[in-house]
Amino acid sequence: LGDRERAQRIGHTLDIVAQLQPLTGYLGEASALLPSDHPWVARANEAREELLAAVRRLFRNLGDVDVVAWRRRLEDLRREYVAAYTELHNRYVLQPGGIERRQRLLRDPRVAQLQALSGVEILNRAELDRWRAAVEAIPSCESFHDGVLADSPRCPYCHFSPAQASGPSATTLLDQLDARLESLGVRWHAAL
């Protein structure tokens, strides 16, 4: 190949890479946010490897890259990611209804009663403090909707990272902490 043909091939390859880069960049960041064992991550990695192989073949002049087909496939992956992220966000982060429920739990008359009893030396005040800290530690986000993932794969409000989430859902945690509050009250009353 002559220098001119090589330069044209390189220019064509760079043009295709530039056309797909916004989607591939988004999906690359998205892959790091989901748990590594999530099925979407495997599909995204497979697509990435196939695209890299296609670009290498193009660079070697052994084939072409169908930009329209790849854009469609990458957009499909992006939509699947938004659905997966939204599902995990809704599971592990309190939404407005859950936030309201948490506030009601913190204002519950049982909490006020235990707060009043916490001054008694034989009772473990730290236990009530740990309970309150656990309730307040549940992540929350009032503004999330899947549209906020249009430009960035992470919620811009709470910066939720599904890869770091595990265990029970936010709602289940509230249920457990409500039961723990009840148990704490029973134990403290029995101790008195």
Image: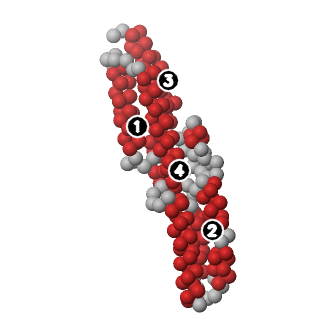
The residue beneath circle 2 is 105
Q: Residue at x 47, y 44 (%)?
A: 84
Give the class, few, some or many, for how many residues have Cα within 10 Å of label 3's Cα (few <14, many ≥20): few
Labels 4 and 2: the sequence-earlier one: 4
Number of marks in picture: 4
Query: Which labelled disc corresponds to residue 83?
Result: none
In front of the other: label 3 or label 1? Answer: 1
In front of the other: label 2 or label 3? Answer: 2
Give the class, few, some or many, for how many residues have Cα within 10 Å of label 1's Cα (few <14, many ≥20): many
The residue beneath circle 3 is 19
Separation (CA) of disc 1 from disc 4: 20 Å
In front of the other: label 4 or label 2? Answer: 2
The residue beneath circle 1 is 44
Labels 2 and 1: the sequence-earlier one: 1
Instruction: Report the front residue among 14 and 169.
Output: 169
Query: Which labelled disc corresponds to residue 89?
Result: 4
Question: Mark 3 near mark 4, Cβ–Cβ under 8 Å?
Answer: no
